[in-house]
Image (cartoon, coloured by chain):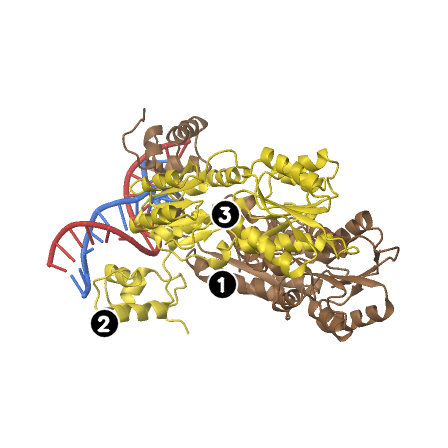
Chain colours: A brown, B yellow, C blue, D red
Amino acid sequence: MNNHANDAPPTLRDVAAAAGVSLATADRVVNGRPGVSAKTARKVHEAVQRLAFRPLAAAAELARSRSWRFAVVLPGGGNRFMMDIADNVRAQADWLRARRIGVEIVETDVFDADRLAAELAALPGRFDAVALVALDHPRIRAAIDDLVEAGMAVVTLVSDAPSSRRQHYVGIDNIAAGRTAGSLVGRFLGPPRGNERGAVGIVTGAGSLRDHAERRFGFGQVLAEEYPQLIRLTPVEGRDDPDRNRELVRRMLADTPNLVAIYNTGEGSVGIGEALAEAGLARRILCVGHELTPATRRMLLDGTFAALVAQDPGHEARSMVRVLHALVAGQEIVAAQEHIRVQVILRDNLP
Amino acid sequence: MNNHANDAPPTLRDVAAAAGVSLATADRVVNGRPGVSAKTARKVHEAVQRLAFRPLAAAAELARSRSWRFAVVLPGGGNRFMMDIADNVRAQADWLRARRIGVEIVETDVFDADRLAAELAALPGRFDAVALVALDHPRIRAAIDDLVEAGMAVVTLVSDAPSSRRQHYVGIDNIAAGRTAGSLVGRFLGPPRGNERGAVGIVTGAGSLRDHAERRFGFGQVLAEEYPQLIRLTPVEGRDDPDRNRELVRRMLADTPNLVAIYNTGEGSVGIGEALAEAGLARRILCVGHELTPATRRMLLDGTFAALVAQDPGHEARSMVRVLHALVAGQEIVAAQEHIRVQVILRDNLP
DNA sequence: CTGTTAGCGCTTTCAA
DNA sequence: TTGAAAGCGCTAACAG
């Protein structure tokens, strides 16, 4: 039997009435604001339970009538993947404006710790929250901690700084991503043919980027454990630049007659494809890379690359905004929704 | 130079003032409601442009103060994947209640078109919108069209009925999923060894389910085009039941000495694993299946299955609710956010 | 066709 | 420590 014939969801007013207190007091208890006696609080809590009260999100948001300023700090320069993230943030403009959230994209040189730290130091006061592609460097760690100290919500994006006090990381598990690439290479190459030992080339962006380093680590783990017949070459650093990568792979091809596969931990895969095409080796040497871009999509379709390990920039952009908003507005984060998956993309499941 | 020193976002009131009309008229124009002269509408539109006005979602939602009832029609019985979807819908309970959305999960026998059609026919009046796992059958198509005719929002879930008038499909492209499975099998098996032709077994749920049929089709396409050395056996139907699948695979193993791989288009993969283990063939015969469940996770970890092609039930549950809400509330659907990806899961990128 | 007005449910001063 | 009351920005009768 119901307490009330009325089936409209209970409001805070109903709770207040049921508890015999005022609206303001009920509000204080429900939102954990101070200045309520333990006894009164208890009565309100009971009423909340009894009526199964849940605050209406829209009403709370309207009454609060606050607006938020978020900064998104991304590496400048023509990195395609980062541009995708920026585009996806912009694509949310309407959604954001309808919630009084302003987002400003700040481009900077993430490789330059001093410059990045200075950029971050200028943020408090102008913004309520920041998302940044972190360099895992003591100076940046300190800069992040200063932001948190200043009361800002901080999340890292794509590349984490786990030892900092950032509240959340929006990105993939890069060790798992590297392992996934390793398994794909190992399985796609198939069992050893005779007793030749094939060589696997590794192209990477830079030793100092945490995400790249983690990918190399995961990749190496799997190859060492599961495919000992494969020889891993020393990683070569092309700074995610197609031209540099092309040159590096040219040399790799010249120096390594038994090369059977190439793994690129970062961007600039198109240079690898070019070097292979020049040598007439496209599709003869197995390639696995990261991130879906127009260039990698093309190379997946023409068979130059067999698979890509990817993260969804759209998901990351949306997740970042949701997490930042939840953080500043004191709402709960839906972990499952914000988990960024390590995707495997073949020609057949291209989005 | 700004028109106003005030930097608070413009409200509908500001628009009305700027256009020299009343709040109500501005509201009519902004929401496309009838009863406004073209001339007045034009003035309001101009003011909207000039002030860059966007309605505040929370205020609109509060003022509308409507509540919604959604029905989610799922197959009853112990299907693990469907239970995951149901659980994920329930996990959103708080989010939903905060928006005055009530969701009721209706279990039924989706294989029985009459029963399903009857179930659907009972929905109008009790619900504003429905999501259902569709059987692509004329009777169901008609039942869906009747719901739409009755003014309900209808989306199909996991299995589509494209020729019906449903407004949206929440699920993966099953042909692409089948192709992906085909490529994984082909590539993982590697180039033919000598001139033996390996046989590939196909276990499927039922011929009548559209999603399974599409997966078989996509799988067959890739194998025929790219891996002609592989012989596809006639699909066997186990109705997604582990016990039936075990029996079918036992027989398959007995009858097919050159069996090199098995593809399961549906559930009940655990029966396949059991039959292989009995025969001492686990990890010697390549297996690819669908959907991540406790059973498939275990078999991925122990190597019985090499890969899974999957869709994320959490994403589907959330997407379904968002789409239904957008549909009934007349909001825009963010296509990119609602696109359900065909995932490839290896041991290394298990979520 | 247009305007006036009373809310929607919660938050936040300001008094008591 | 508690309460009264004035909104937040938009919607939806109801008048005109």
Q: Which numbered dot is residue B39?
A: 2
- CA separation in Å, label 3 and label 2: 45 Å
> Looking at the image, is mark 1 or mark 3 nearer the viewer?
3
Q: Which chain does tag 3 point to?
A: B
* Residue nearer the viewer, A37 or A264: A264
Q: Is residue B49 above or below residue A159?
A: below
Same-chain status of marks 3 and 2 = yes
Q: Are marks 3 and 2 in contact (CB under 8 Å)?
A: no
Q: Which chain does tag 1 point to?
A: A
Q: Amino acid at mark 3?
A: Glu
Q: Residues within 10 Å of mark 2 (few under 14, many from 20)?
A: few
Q: Secondary structure under badge 3?
A: helix
Q: Which chain does tag 2 point to?
A: B
Relative placement, left or right, of B37 versus A173 is left
Q: Count the marks: how many?
A: 3
Q: Is residue A75 visible?
A: no
Q: Amino acid at mark 2?
A: Lys
| Quadrant position of the C terminus of chain B in the picture | top right
Residue at the disc numbered 1: A91
